[in-house]
Image (cartoon, rainbow, N blue to C red):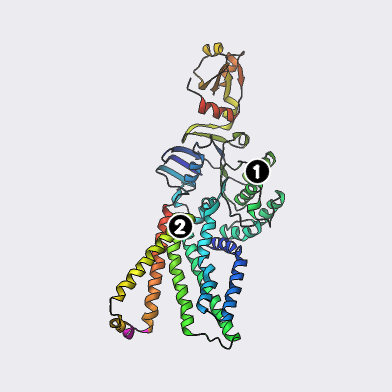
Amino acid sequence: MKGLFLKDLSIIKTQGRAVVLIMIIALFMLMAGNNTTFAVVYANVLFVTFGITTLSYDYHDNGYVFLFTLPISRKLYVMEKYVFSILSIITGTILSFVMMLGVSFIKDDYILTTSELSFVVAYAVGAIVISCIMLPVNLKFGPEKGKIAMIALIAIVVSGIFIMVKISDTMDLTKMSWIIRESSIMSFVGIPTGIVLLIISFSYLISCKIMEQKEF
Amino acid sequence: MIKLEHAEKHYKQFSLNCSLEVKAGQITGLIGENGAGKSTTFKLILDLIHADGGQIEVFGKPVYELTKEDKANMGVVLSDSGFGGYMTVKNLIPILSAFYLNFDEDSFLKGCEKYRIPLNKKIKDFSTGMKTKLKMLVAVTHGAKLLILDEPTAGLDVIVRDEFLEMLQDYMEKGERSILISSHISSDLENLCDNFYMIHDGKIIMHEETDVLLSEYGILKPTIEQYQALDKQYLIKVKEEAFGYRCLTNERQYYMENYPDMIIEKGNIDEMILLMVRGKTA
């Protein structure tokens, strides 16, 4: 996996300037103190797409053909894409934390709140889940058709959320407050972590299946 | 090293049914016109596409059972695919060291110097010749026992072709190694290969040792009258031409002795392909 990892890092190096530029802009946003959450989303956006970016590079110029003549298996390739994507997101999240902490030290009027920190974590989790959808879609359809498939998928998800909101409007959610009262902190952390791990595993298995069937 | 027994692959407009063998210590050429099935055969051997039937073995194992170590024992050069253009050769070195346990950085760097491959230039800015030499260097500097080269000489000028053949000869000198190489320009391969397979329309139409091909095969060029009187039992293929016939035989000596007035040439492999593909059975 080391070879694949180094190869992907050399792709990301080509985007080094863009990363630095985005980080500086995000830092300015934080310093200006207008909208912390937007700054975090902005700073992280490249890190979220790194995995997919490397996939596009592999795909172009008939790259897959040569790649799979190297001493790697298709499963290992898929595994590396997931590890690389998740590590990129974690790196972006850590950098966001560091930036927020730095700004909170420099600026007296900026106080880092737990809600802001939880937003960064939630954003990272959301990014991992999105990657888990994007990776198999891109592996199956390739980067160009993958974009169309992603738009269709987003439309379905948004429609689903819209329908759920409409249904929840008709329900009395205060009756559900017992869940919060009865739940321990462990289950608040444990259940979402379990769900995310389940999503990653499920997505990984689908991606492996796609790659096993693929012909180059 | 490689064994294909009725390896089949079916597409809508093309079907492959191929049997061939590459033995240890030998260089085997796969020749045929564009679209004959050379690349499909290579892709089956490299497990890049799934066979619809038959058996494909490399190092005595079915291709789908090859381990990471087995694949590290193979060096592959493909004409239309390689490392990403965004990389430089310098970037490539740690990656190759990570992929191949036996990667010989010293001989790779010496090769780069010898064949004038720049270390700091992006691969996308390389000429076709430079790209091929780089792919070839990668293939021969990690201790591979088997080289699989699909149309490696495509688009190369005479000098680069010569350098390329020199690299192959150097490679074969270092122990019992094998090469499977394909080309649609077979003159490159005449002095290199121990034996040839000729593929046409997805099928192997001829397999012969190069020595036999060059010493026993020949092209007869009889006039219409000479052709009518000709003993046709040793003619493999015949093609009618404007002023007579062109015939492929595997008994050149017989015709030379019995028809001294007839034009009989040794012929090269390209001419033989042409007759095998375009000619009719006598």
- Pointer 1 local density, CA inside 10 Å: few below 14, some 14–19, many at least 20: many
- Residue B241 in which image quadrant: top right
Residue found at x 71% / y 49%: B114
- Residue B102 in which image quadrant: bottom right
Pinpoint residue A66: horizontal percent, then vertical percent: 54, 51
Depth check: give the residue in front, B137 or B72.
Answer: B137
Depth check: give the residue in front, B23 or A128.
Answer: A128
| Residue tagged 1 | B164
Cα separation, mark 2 vs mark 1, equals 39 Å
Q: In the rendering, which numbered label is found on residue B97?
A: none
Mark 2 belongs to which amino acid? Gly
As drawn, B211 above or below A55: above
- The answer to whether residue A42 is magenta is no
Characterize the magenta stretch by its predominant secondary structure: helix
Q: What segment carries the magenta color?
A: A180-184
Q: Secondary structure at mark 1?
A: helix
Instruction: Report whether residue B151 is seen.
Output: yes
Q: In the rendering, which numbered label is found on residue A146?
A: 2
Pinpoint residue B227: horizontal percent, then vertical percent: 54, 14
